[in-house]
Amino acid sequence: MNILVIGSGGREHALCWAIAKSPLCDRLICAPGNGGIADVAECMALDISDHEAVIALCRANAIDFVVVGPEVPLVAGIADDLTAAGFKTFGPSAAAAQLEGSKGFTKDLCAKHNIPTAAYARFSEAEAAKAYARTQSAPLVIKADGLAAGKGVVIAQSLEEACETIDEIFAGAFGNAGAEVVVEAFLVGEEASFFALVDGKTVLPLATAQDHKQVGDGDTGPNTGGMGAYSPAPVMSDALCQRTLDEIISPTVAAMAAAGTPFRGVLFAGLMITDTGPQLIEYNVRFGDPECQVLMVRLKDDLVTLLLAAADGQLDHVSARWIDDVALTVVMAAEGYPGSYEKNTEIGNLAEAGAGDTVEIFHAGTARSPSGACLATGGRVLNVTGIGANVADAQAKAYGAVDKVDWPGGFCRRDIGWRAVAREAS
Protein backbone atom coordinates (compact mmCIF):
# COMPACT_ATOMS: atom_id res chain seq x y z
CA MET A 1 0.00 0.00 0.00
CA ASN A 2 0.99 3.65 -0.49
CA ILE A 3 1.40 5.40 2.86
CA LEU A 4 1.71 9.11 3.62
CA VAL A 5 3.18 10.36 6.89
CA ILE A 6 2.45 13.99 7.70
CA GLY A 7 5.09 15.94 9.62
CA SER A 8 8.75 16.87 9.67
CA GLY A 9 10.19 16.11 13.11
CA GLY A 10 12.02 13.38 14.95
CA ARG A 11 8.74 11.66 15.73
CA GLU A 12 7.93 11.44 12.04
CA HIS A 13 11.41 10.13 11.23
CA ALA A 14 10.90 7.36 13.80
CA LEU A 15 7.45 6.57 12.41
CA CYS A 16 8.77 6.46 8.84
CA TRP A 17 11.71 4.28 9.96
CA ALA A 18 9.27 1.77 11.47
CA ILE A 19 6.70 1.96 8.66
CA ALA A 20 9.36 1.44 5.98
CA LYS A 21 10.15 -1.97 7.52
CA SER A 22 6.56 -3.19 7.10
CA PRO A 23 5.82 -5.68 4.32
CA LEU A 24 2.51 -3.85 3.90
CA CYS A 25 4.29 -0.68 2.76
CA ASP A 26 4.97 -0.49 -0.97
CA ARG A 27 5.63 3.24 -1.19
CA LEU A 28 6.25 5.69 1.64
CA ILE A 29 5.92 9.47 1.32
CA CYS A 30 6.53 12.00 4.07
CA ALA A 31 5.30 15.58 3.76
CA PRO A 32 7.20 17.75 4.23
CA GLY A 33 9.82 15.48 5.87
CA ASN A 34 13.40 16.41 6.72
CA GLY A 35 16.99 15.62 5.79
CA GLY A 36 17.04 12.29 7.63
CA ILE A 37 13.56 11.12 6.65
CA ALA A 38 14.74 11.37 3.03
CA ASP A 39 16.82 8.23 3.69
CA VAL A 40 13.71 6.07 4.30
CA ALA A 41 10.88 7.87 2.47
CA GLU A 42 10.15 10.22 -0.41
CA CYS A 43 9.94 13.74 1.00
CA MET A 44 7.50 16.14 -0.64
CA ALA A 45 7.28 19.86 0.15
CA LEU A 46 3.81 20.65 1.44
CA ASP A 47 2.03 23.17 3.66
CA ILE A 48 0.30 20.72 6.01
CA SER A 49 -2.04 23.47 7.25
CA ASP A 50 -3.55 23.53 3.75
CA HIS A 51 -5.86 20.54 3.97
CA GLU A 52 -6.92 20.76 0.33
CA ALA A 53 -3.26 20.55 -0.69
CA VAL A 54 -2.83 17.46 1.49
CA ILE A 55 -5.87 15.85 -0.10
CA ALA A 56 -4.59 16.72 -3.57
CA LEU A 57 -1.25 15.06 -2.80
CA CYS A 58 -3.10 11.95 -1.62
CA ARG A 59 -5.10 11.80 -4.84
CA ALA A 60 -2.09 12.42 -7.06
CA ASN A 61 -0.13 9.61 -5.39
CA ALA A 62 -2.95 7.08 -4.86
CA ILE A 63 -2.42 7.11 -1.09
CA ASP A 64 -4.07 4.23 0.75
CA PHE A 65 -3.32 5.25 4.34
CA VAL A 66 -2.37 8.53 6.03
CA VAL A 67 -0.56 8.72 9.37
CA VAL A 68 -0.70 12.17 10.96
CA GLY A 69 2.27 12.90 13.21
CA PRO A 70 1.86 16.37 14.84
CA GLU A 71 -0.92 17.69 17.03
CA VAL A 72 -1.58 21.00 15.28
CA PRO A 73 -3.13 19.55 12.09
CA LEU A 74 -5.13 17.04 14.18
CA VAL A 75 -6.65 19.79 16.32
CA ALA A 76 -7.34 21.69 13.08
CA GLY A 77 -9.39 18.74 11.77
CA ILE A 78 -7.13 17.23 9.14
CA ALA A 79 -8.28 13.70 10.00
CA ASP A 80 -11.90 14.74 9.46
CA ASP A 81 -11.12 16.29 6.09
CA LEU A 82 -9.03 13.34 4.88
CA THR A 83 -11.69 10.85 5.98
CA ALA A 84 -14.42 12.86 4.26
CA ALA A 85 -12.32 12.80 1.09
CA GLY A 86 -12.15 9.00 1.27
CA PHE A 87 -8.67 8.47 2.71
CA LYS A 88 -8.14 6.06 5.59
CA THR A 89 -6.40 8.08 8.31
CA PHE A 90 -4.68 7.34 11.61
CA GLY A 91 -5.43 10.17 14.02
CA PRO A 92 -8.40 11.52 15.99
CA SER A 93 -11.12 13.84 14.79
CA ALA A 94 -10.94 17.51 15.74
CA ALA A 95 -13.62 16.92 18.38
CA ALA A 96 -11.63 14.09 19.96
CA ALA A 97 -8.35 16.01 19.61
CA GLN A 98 -9.70 18.53 22.11
CA LEU A 99 -8.14 16.23 24.70
CA GLU A 100 -4.88 17.93 23.75
CA GLY A 101 -6.17 21.08 22.10
CA SER A 102 -7.85 22.36 25.25
CA LYS A 103 -6.45 21.67 28.70
CA GLY A 104 -9.66 23.03 30.20
CA PHE A 105 -11.73 20.55 28.18
CA THR A 106 -9.70 17.66 29.55
CA LYS A 107 -9.81 18.95 33.14
CA ASP A 108 -13.59 19.28 32.92
CA LEU A 109 -13.86 15.74 31.55
CA CYS A 110 -11.72 14.44 34.43
CA ALA A 111 -13.88 16.25 36.97
CA LYS A 112 -17.08 14.88 35.48
CA HIS A 113 -15.86 11.29 35.34
CA ASN A 114 -13.77 11.14 38.53
CA ILE A 115 -10.49 10.69 36.69
CA PRO A 116 -7.62 11.46 39.08
CA THR A 117 -5.94 14.78 38.30
CA ALA A 118 -4.83 17.92 40.11
CA ALA A 119 -7.41 20.35 41.50
CA TYR A 120 -7.92 23.23 39.07
CA ALA A 121 -9.95 26.17 37.85
CA ARG A 122 -10.12 27.65 34.35
CA PHE A 123 -10.44 31.30 33.39
CA SER A 124 -10.92 33.54 30.37
CA GLU A 125 -9.97 36.76 32.19
CA ALA A 126 -6.79 37.64 34.06
CA GLU A 127 -8.20 39.31 37.18
CA ALA A 128 -10.43 36.35 38.03
CA ALA A 129 -7.53 33.94 37.49
CA LYS A 130 -5.25 36.00 39.75
CA ALA A 131 -7.94 36.29 42.42
CA TYR A 132 -8.25 32.50 42.44
CA ALA A 133 -4.49 32.02 42.52
CA ARG A 134 -4.23 34.23 45.61
CA THR A 135 -6.53 31.82 47.48
CA GLN A 136 -4.19 28.90 46.77
CA SER A 137 -0.80 27.79 48.07
CA ALA A 138 2.37 27.95 45.97
CA PRO A 139 3.78 26.38 43.95
CA LEU A 140 1.03 26.56 41.34
CA VAL A 141 0.95 25.29 37.78
CA ILE A 142 -0.22 27.88 35.25
CA LYS A 143 -1.17 26.54 31.82
CA ALA A 144 -2.19 28.17 28.57
CA ASP A 145 -5.34 26.33 27.52
CA GLY A 146 -4.39 25.67 23.90
CA LEU A 147 -1.46 24.29 21.93
CA ALA A 148 1.87 25.93 22.72
CA ALA A 149 4.44 23.46 21.32
CA GLY A 150 5.03 21.94 24.75
CA LYS A 151 6.00 25.30 26.26
CA GLY A 152 2.70 26.69 27.60
CA VAL A 153 3.16 25.44 31.16
CA VAL A 154 4.83 27.39 33.97
CA ILE A 155 5.43 26.12 37.52
CA ALA A 156 5.11 29.27 39.60
CA GLN A 157 7.08 29.03 42.83
CA SER A 158 5.27 31.97 44.44
CA LEU A 159 1.86 33.60 44.24
CA GLU A 160 3.56 36.71 42.81
CA GLU A 161 5.10 34.63 40.03
CA ALA A 162 1.74 32.96 39.40
CA CYS A 163 0.03 36.32 38.93
CA GLU A 164 2.82 37.58 36.69
CA THR A 165 2.57 34.44 34.57
CA ILE A 166 -1.19 34.80 34.26
CA ASP A 167 -0.74 38.39 33.04
CA GLU A 168 1.93 37.30 30.55
CA ILE A 169 -0.22 34.52 29.11
CA PHE A 170 -3.26 36.76 28.68
CA ALA A 171 -0.95 39.40 27.15
CA GLY A 172 -0.04 36.92 24.41
CA ALA A 173 3.09 35.09 25.61
CA PHE A 174 1.78 31.92 23.95
CA GLY A 175 -0.36 33.50 21.26
CA ASN A 176 -3.88 32.22 20.78
CA ALA A 177 -3.12 29.30 23.07
CA GLY A 178 -3.49 31.72 25.98
CA ALA A 179 -7.06 32.83 25.32
CA GLU A 180 -7.91 30.81 28.42
CA VAL A 181 -5.76 29.83 31.39
CA VAL A 182 -5.92 26.82 33.68
CA VAL A 183 -4.60 27.21 37.24
CA GLU A 184 -3.72 23.88 38.85
CA ALA A 185 -2.47 22.57 42.15
CA PHE A 186 1.13 21.35 42.02
CA LEU A 187 1.46 17.57 42.14
CA VAL A 188 4.42 15.99 43.89
CA GLY A 189 5.88 12.77 42.48
CA GLU A 190 7.68 11.34 39.48
CA GLU A 191 6.50 11.96 35.93
CA ALA A 192 5.96 9.18 33.42
CA SER A 193 4.35 8.74 30.02
CA PHE A 194 1.84 6.01 29.14
CA PHE A 195 0.83 5.26 25.56
CA ALA A 196 -2.15 3.35 24.20
CA LEU A 197 -3.74 2.83 20.81
CA VAL A 198 -7.50 3.40 20.77
CA ASP A 199 -10.02 2.54 18.05
CA GLY A 200 -13.03 4.30 19.57
CA LYS A 201 -13.84 1.52 22.01
CA THR A 202 -10.91 -0.88 22.47
CA VAL A 203 -7.70 0.17 24.22
CA LEU A 204 -4.40 -1.51 23.35
CA PRO A 205 -1.69 -0.52 25.85
CA LEU A 206 1.65 0.17 24.26
CA ALA A 207 4.71 1.01 26.37
CA THR A 208 5.82 3.51 28.97
CA ALA A 209 8.50 6.18 28.76
CA GLN A 210 9.96 9.03 30.72
CA ASP A 211 11.13 12.30 29.22
CA HIS A 212 13.11 15.35 30.29
CA LYS A 213 11.36 18.61 29.43
CA GLN A 214 13.73 21.17 30.92
CA VAL A 215 16.68 22.40 28.92
CA GLY A 216 19.38 22.02 31.56
CA ASP A 217 21.07 19.18 33.42
CA GLY A 218 19.34 18.25 36.66
CA ASP A 219 15.99 19.22 35.12
CA THR A 220 16.73 22.94 35.38
CA GLY A 221 15.92 25.90 33.17
CA PRO A 222 12.92 26.58 30.94
CA ASN A 223 10.64 23.90 29.54
CA THR A 224 11.26 22.71 25.99
CA GLY A 225 9.57 20.32 23.60
CA GLY A 226 11.74 17.60 25.20
CA MET A 227 15.49 17.10 25.59
CA GLY A 228 15.54 13.31 25.83
CA ALA A 229 13.58 10.23 26.85
CA TYR A 230 13.90 6.56 27.68
CA SER A 231 11.64 3.51 27.63
CA PRO A 232 10.42 1.65 29.58
CA ALA A 233 9.91 3.92 32.60
CA PRO A 234 11.12 1.98 35.66
CA VAL A 235 8.64 3.76 37.94
CA MET A 236 5.72 2.26 35.98
CA SER A 237 5.25 -1.16 37.56
CA ASP A 238 2.70 -3.60 36.16
CA ALA A 239 0.34 -2.59 38.96
CA LEU A 240 0.69 1.13 38.15
CA CYS A 241 0.15 0.44 34.45
CA GLN A 242 -3.06 -1.43 35.27
CA ARG A 243 -4.27 1.39 37.53
CA THR A 244 -3.54 3.88 34.74
CA LEU A 245 -5.64 1.84 32.36
CA ASP A 246 -8.49 1.31 34.83
CA GLU A 247 -8.61 4.76 36.42
CA ILE A 248 -7.51 7.10 33.64
CA ILE A 249 -7.38 5.72 30.07
CA SER A 250 -10.47 3.49 29.97
CA PRO A 251 -12.80 6.03 31.64
CA THR A 252 -11.60 8.68 29.19
CA VAL A 253 -12.23 6.46 26.16
CA ALA A 254 -15.70 5.54 27.48
CA ALA A 255 -16.53 9.20 28.16
CA MET A 256 -15.48 10.31 24.68
CA ALA A 257 -17.55 7.55 23.07
CA ALA A 258 -20.58 8.40 25.21
CA ALA A 259 -20.28 12.05 24.16
CA GLY A 260 -20.45 11.05 20.49
CA THR A 261 -16.80 11.96 19.87
CA PRO A 262 -15.06 8.57 19.97
CA PHE A 263 -11.29 8.74 20.15
CA ARG A 264 -9.30 6.91 17.47
CA GLY A 265 -5.55 7.18 17.39
CA VAL A 266 -2.81 7.12 19.99
CA LEU A 267 -3.58 8.45 23.44
CA PHE A 268 -0.52 9.66 25.32
CA ALA A 269 -1.10 10.26 29.01
CA GLY A 270 1.40 12.42 30.85
CA LEU A 271 1.25 11.16 34.43
CA MET A 272 2.46 12.13 37.85
CA ILE A 273 3.07 9.10 40.04
CA THR A 274 2.10 10.37 43.49
CA ASP A 275 1.90 8.70 46.88
CA THR A 276 -1.74 7.89 46.14
CA GLY A 277 -1.11 6.53 42.64
CA PRO A 278 -1.11 7.86 39.07
CA GLN A 279 -2.71 11.21 38.33
CA LEU A 280 -3.22 12.73 34.89
CA ILE A 281 -1.15 15.82 34.12
CA GLU A 282 -2.31 16.14 30.52
CA TYR A 283 -3.27 14.21 27.41
CA ASN A 284 -1.59 14.31 24.03
CA VAL A 285 -3.39 12.90 21.00
CA ARG A 286 -0.28 11.81 19.06
CA PHE A 287 2.98 10.04 19.74
CA GLY A 288 5.33 12.07 21.91
CA ASP A 289 8.48 13.62 20.59
CA PRO A 290 11.07 12.37 21.62
CA GLU A 291 9.16 9.47 23.25
CA CYS A 292 8.11 8.05 19.89
CA GLN A 293 11.74 7.48 19.00
CA VAL A 294 12.39 5.20 21.98
CA LEU A 295 9.09 3.36 21.48
CA MET A 296 9.74 2.61 17.83
CA VAL A 297 13.16 1.04 18.39
CA ARG A 298 11.62 -1.27 21.05
CA LEU A 299 8.54 -2.33 19.05
CA LYS A 300 8.70 -5.93 17.82
CA ASP A 301 5.47 -5.98 15.83
CA ASP A 302 4.51 -4.40 12.50
CA LEU A 303 3.61 -0.77 13.17
CA VAL A 304 1.43 -0.52 10.07
CA THR A 305 -0.71 -3.47 11.19
CA LEU A 306 -1.26 -1.79 14.57
CA LEU A 307 -2.10 1.63 13.14
CA LEU A 308 -4.50 0.13 10.60
CA ALA A 309 -6.24 -1.83 13.36
CA ALA A 310 -6.78 1.41 15.29
CA ALA A 311 -8.15 3.16 12.22
CA ASP A 312 -10.41 0.23 11.31
CA GLY A 313 -11.82 -0.50 14.78
CA GLN A 314 -9.99 -3.85 14.96
CA LEU A 315 -7.65 -3.43 17.93
CA ASP A 316 -9.22 -6.39 19.70
CA HIS A 317 -7.59 -8.60 17.02
CA VAL A 318 -3.96 -7.44 17.43
CA SER A 319 -1.29 -7.22 20.12
CA ALA A 320 1.92 -5.28 20.62
CA ARG A 321 5.19 -6.83 21.78
CA TRP A 322 8.36 -5.09 22.89
CA ILE A 323 12.00 -6.00 23.17
CA ASP A 324 13.23 -6.22 26.76
CA ASP A 325 16.14 -3.85 26.11
CA VAL A 326 16.00 -0.21 27.14
CA ALA A 327 16.07 2.58 24.57
CA LEU A 328 17.32 6.06 25.48
CA THR A 329 17.41 9.08 23.20
CA VAL A 330 19.39 12.30 23.62
CA VAL A 331 18.18 15.43 21.85
CA MET A 332 20.91 17.49 20.23
CA ALA A 333 19.67 21.06 19.89
CA ALA A 334 20.98 24.26 18.36
CA GLU A 335 22.89 26.54 20.75
CA GLY A 336 20.41 29.04 22.19
CA TYR A 337 17.36 26.75 22.12
CA PRO A 338 14.65 27.18 23.42
CA GLY A 339 15.47 30.83 22.73
CA SER A 340 16.85 32.18 19.47
CA TYR A 341 19.42 30.11 17.60
CA GLU A 342 21.41 30.09 14.39
CA LYS A 343 20.12 28.05 11.46
CA ASN A 344 21.90 26.20 8.66
CA THR A 345 24.97 25.21 10.66
CA GLU A 346 26.58 22.07 9.25
CA ILE A 347 26.55 18.69 11.01
CA GLY A 348 29.20 16.10 10.21
CA ASN A 349 30.22 12.51 10.96
CA LEU A 350 26.64 11.22 11.30
CA ALA A 351 27.35 7.96 9.47
CA GLU A 352 30.09 6.97 11.90
CA ALA A 353 28.08 8.16 14.91
CA GLY A 354 25.06 6.08 13.89
CA ALA A 355 26.96 2.94 12.89
CA GLY A 356 26.10 -0.38 14.56
CA ASP A 357 22.97 -2.17 15.70
CA THR A 358 22.67 -0.42 19.06
CA VAL A 359 22.39 3.19 17.85
CA GLU A 360 19.80 4.95 15.70
CA ILE A 361 19.93 8.65 14.85
CA PHE A 362 16.60 10.27 14.05
CA HIS A 363 16.54 13.72 12.47
CA ALA A 364 14.22 16.35 13.89
CA GLY A 365 15.24 19.67 12.32
CA THR A 366 17.56 19.07 9.38
CA ALA A 367 17.78 19.64 5.64
CA ARG A 368 20.21 18.58 2.94
CA SER A 369 22.25 21.22 1.14
CA PRO A 370 22.65 20.98 -2.67
CA SER A 371 26.00 19.26 -2.03
CA GLY A 372 24.38 16.72 0.30
CA ALA A 373 25.64 18.19 3.58
CA CYS A 374 23.38 17.91 6.62
CA LEU A 375 22.27 21.31 7.90
CA ALA A 376 20.57 22.15 11.18
CA THR A 377 17.33 24.00 10.45
CA GLY A 378 15.44 23.79 13.73
CA GLY A 379 15.81 24.10 17.49
CA ARG A 380 15.73 20.40 18.30
CA VAL A 381 17.82 18.86 15.55
CA LEU A 382 18.86 15.24 16.22
CA ASN A 383 17.65 12.37 18.43
CA VAL A 384 20.63 10.14 19.15
CA THR A 385 19.19 6.87 20.41
CA GLY A 386 20.99 4.05 22.19
CA ILE A 387 19.71 0.53 22.90
CA GLY A 388 21.10 -1.38 25.87
CA ALA A 389 20.48 -4.04 28.50
CA ASN A 390 19.54 -1.40 31.07
CA VAL A 391 19.22 2.37 31.30
CA ALA A 392 22.90 2.92 32.11
CA ASP A 393 23.94 0.79 29.14
CA ALA A 394 21.55 2.55 26.75
CA GLN A 395 22.70 5.91 28.11
CA ALA A 396 26.36 5.02 27.51
CA LYS A 397 25.64 3.98 23.93
CA ALA A 398 23.65 7.14 23.21
CA TYR A 399 26.29 9.49 24.60
CA GLY A 400 29.05 7.51 22.91
CA ALA A 401 27.34 8.28 19.61
CA VAL A 402 26.68 11.92 20.58
CA ASP A 403 30.40 12.40 21.14
CA LYS A 404 31.10 11.29 17.57
CA VAL A 405 28.76 13.86 16.01
CA ASP A 406 30.71 16.81 14.62
CA TRP A 407 28.48 19.80 15.30
CA PRO A 408 30.06 22.81 17.03
CA GLY A 409 26.73 24.67 16.80
CA GLY A 410 24.85 22.12 18.90
CA PHE A 411 24.48 21.07 22.52
CA CYS A 412 22.69 18.48 24.60
CA ARG A 413 21.93 17.60 28.18
CA ARG A 414 24.44 15.14 29.59
CA ASP A 415 22.18 13.45 32.15
CA ILE A 416 19.23 11.94 30.26
CA GLY A 417 17.92 9.01 32.30
CA TRP A 418 19.61 10.12 35.55
CA ARG A 419 16.76 9.06 37.82
CA ALA A 420 16.62 5.58 36.35
CA VAL A 421 20.40 5.18 36.38
CA ALA A 422 20.42 6.13 40.08
CA ARG A 423 17.61 3.65 40.73
CA GLU A 424 19.57 0.87 39.00
CA ALA A 425 22.68 1.66 41.04
CA SER A 426 20.89 1.65 44.40
Image (tube, rainbow, N blue to C red):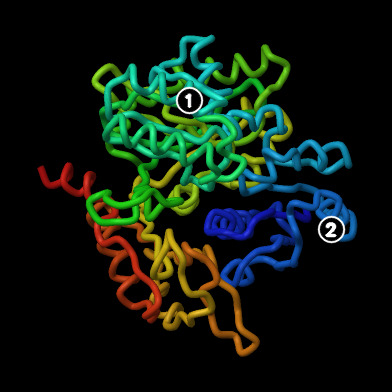
Residue 193 in sight in this render: yes
* Residue 238: numbered disc: none
Give whichever of 232, 25 is nearer the camera: 232
Image coordinates for residue 190, horizontal then vertical, percent:
28, 34
Residue at disc 1, secondary structure: helix
Give whichever of 146, 255 is nearer the camera: 146
Q: Quadrant of residue 231?
A: top left
| Residue located beneath label 2 in the image | 57
Which tag is nearer the camera, tag 1 or tag 2?
1
Image coordinates for residue 323, horizontal then vertical, percent:
40, 47
Q: Quadrant of residue 157?
A: top left
| Residue located beneath label 1 in the image | 127
Residue 208 in sight in this render: no
Q: Is residue 352 above or below residue 280?
A: below
- Alpha carbon separation for disc pair 1 and 2: 47 Å
Question: Are dots 1 and 2 in contact, CB under 8 Å?
Answer: no
- Residue at point 39%, 39% (across, down): 154
Q: Is residue 64 left or right of residue 170?
A: right
Q: Is residue 117 above or below residue 236?
A: above
Of callouts 1 and 2, which one flags the residue occurring earlier in the amino acid sequence?
2
Q: Is residue 340 left or right of residue 190?
A: right
Which residue type carries mark 2?
Leu
| Residue at far left of view | 426
Which residue type carries mark 1?
Glu
